[in-house]
Image (cartoon, rainbow, N blue to C red):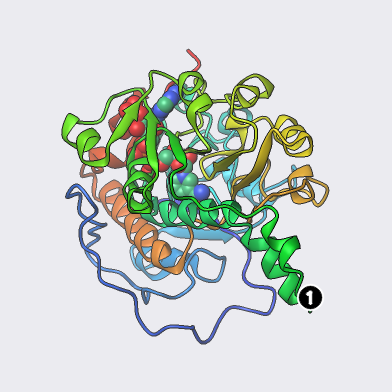
Amino acid sequence: MAKVLCVLYDDPEDGYPTTYARDDLPVIDHYPGGQTTPTPKAIDFTPGHLLGSVSGELGLRSFLESQGHTLVVTSSKEGDDSVLDRELPDAEVVISQPFWPAYLTAERIAKAPNLKLAITAGIGSDHVDLDAAIAHGITVAEVTYCNSISVAEHVVMMTLSLVRNYLPSYQVVLDGGWNIAHCVSRSYDLEGMHVGTVAAGRIGLAVLRRLAPFDVKLHYTDRHRLPESIERDLNLTFHPDAADMVPHCDVVTINAPLHPETEGLFGDKLIGQMKRGAYLINTARAKIADRDAVDRALRSGQLAGYAGDVWYPQPAPADHPWRTMPHHGMTPHISGSSLSAQARYAAGTREILESWLDGTPIRDEYLIVDGGGLAGTGAHSYSTRS
Ligand code: NDP
């Protein structure tokens, strides 16, 4: 029987919800491009309920316990005395979310001889040391596409919010003020601006599609070029790399995974090559941008704004400079954890577990590492150190 260790974020401070703002979710059975949304044999949760926090348990308890497996759910993941570290040595499966990542470092993996499967209930498995997972024969899987559109919506929201100076203007209302000039002296229209994405995968392409109706000029860079028909339809300009793209852009959005090729990409040098007063939106992974270089660029005016929801480490410490730097629109890591997304990634986690426990193949598009190497989506979109 398997022991499944599930690391989730804490419940709300005022307790697990008993009511919700809305009664239902739209039914979505296919993603753009045709991939089906998760297809577990059954679910034991109500879509639209809070599933990603400790009491939500991703809706997995009765499914696992009815088959004799053990489920341990915790938010305790830091320090040697964490529940994660105490329970890891005999766990066969670890489930974690990028929002509250259980960092599966090489050291932790070395202390987990029974670990065979690491599931990301979401997208982005950079919290797992993939080289160590490969070396130990661990399978790494994520619920590809489950929250890509959720994030794309967040990127659009943050782009408009920065360019139009929404958050400071909202603050004026909260403060009881009415100084129009204060609000509009940093407010612009997005129309006509050049917007570029670093990576045009599921999120990046969805951002391009959503921004096209704003009559902006769209740019992208990616390791693989998009089909010509898409480039034509969206009037896209392709650039061989980020350094070639950013000098042309008023807004840059980062939508690549964090892996050795992208770590630290947006440092002083690349940010210095951006247009003065450009906006940078990063909902991909914090470490793709250099923390202090972003802070410096906002203070000098090289960047007019920075927004995103990804930090390092997570949770971010109270004194993290991105909490207090000027002209930012940061949120905690929430873009991919809307209640809508949670219903999909809980169902996808269950689908992966069903396959694992039944001994049937996990969908290829969910695989990042398998059989001692990068596999599936991992083979297409990630790199390793070795
Ligand atoms: P996809 O796998 O669909 O897209 C990733 C894209 O990045 C691929 O097109 C890939 O290229 C491209 N890419 C990889 N390396 C580079 C590089 N060095 N330069 C340019 N492009 C590169 O994933 P998604 O779009 O669904 O998600 C992207 C990332 O967003 C995730 O890995 C995750 O880190 C983050 N994310 C954040 C969330 C949040 O809540 N904030 C939620 C979900 C995801 P190719 O495949 O052509 O090689």
Q: Quick check: which quadrant has ligand 1?
A: top left
Q: Is residue 77 toward the left or the right of residue 45 in the image?
A: right
Q: Is residue 11 toward the left or the right of residue 96 in the image?
A: right
Q: Farthest residue to the right: give it.
A: 319
Residue placed under numbered mark 1 in the picture? 177
* Relative depth, front residue between 341 and 327: 327
Q: Residue at x 71, y 46 (%)?
A: 78
* Relative depth, front residue between 338 and 177: 177
For residue 378, say whether it is visible.
Answer: no
Q: Is residue 15 above or below residue 369?
A: below
Amino acid type, mark 1: Gly
Q: Residue at x 58, y 44 (%)?
A: 88
Location of residue 14 by image quarter: bottom right
* Relative depth, front residue between 109 and 271: 271
In percent of width and height, residue 345 lies at 38, 57
Q: Residue at x 59, y 50 (%)?
A: 309
Secondary element type, mark 1: loop
Within 10 Å of disc 1 (Cα), the crowding (few <14, some 14-19, many 20+) is: few
In percent of width and height, residue 362 lies at 26, 43
For residue 174, say whether it is visible.
Answer: yes
